[in-house]
Image (spheres, rainbow, N blue to C red):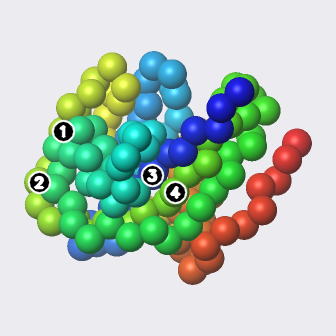
Amino acid sequence: MTVKVGVGVIIANPQGQILLGKRCGSHAPFWSIPGGHLEEGETFEQAAVREVEEETGLIVAEPRLIGVTNNLGTWIDEGVHNVSMIMVATYMRGEPQLREPEKCEQWRWCNPQRMPEPCFEACRHGVQLWLNGEFYHPPITK
């Protein structure tokens, strides 16, 4: 088995809401921040900008690494082990669009204190790290 590296991007609007997408396909019915897997030779920052633009059409700038999640719950439930780099990026312009409707059925600005459920493990833990000003918290295994 290979452990994959993912990048999740927290984007906050001027009202303090974060962008979440309701996934369909392989991660249905979970809500999650925009993101995906790191491509060979790509920096975390490049992956963050690319994934946000590919999934939402939004233009973001200055992505920075703020946390790491080791997604063992997903490994236990699905047999897929991802480690996610949680990034925060500055929202520059644009309105969220469904650029990959086979992967996401809607985008919504949400209060980070009251996110819709079910929420994807890496997203839930990443947003908690961001809200608490933490970088890493050991995963809780079942």
Q: Is residue 37 left or right of residue 58?
A: right
Q: Is residue 78 left or right of residue 21?
A: right
Residue contact between numbered discs 1 and 3, judged by CB atoms under 8 Å: no
Residue contact between numbered discs 3 and 4, judged by CB atoms under 8 Å: yes
3D distance between C-alphas at marks 4 and 1: 23 Å
Q: Position of residue 46 (x, y in %)?
A: 30, 54
Residue contact between numbered discs 4 and 1, judged by CB atoms under 8 Å: no
3D distance between C-alphas at marks 3 and 4: 6 Å
Look at mark 2 in the image and give the residue it sits on. 94
Kindly identify the amino acid type of the residue bearing the numbered disc 3.
Answer: Gly
Kindly identify the amino acid type of the residue bearing the numbered disc 4.
Answer: Met
Q: Secondary structure at mark 2?
A: loop
**Residue 48 can be seen in this image:** no
Kindly identify the amino acid type of the residue bearing the numbered disc 1.
Answer: Gln
Q: Position of residue 86 (x, y in %)?
A: 49, 60
Residues packed near mark 3 inside 10 Å, few (<14), some (14 to 19) or many (20 plus): many
Q: Secondary structure at mark 3?
A: strand
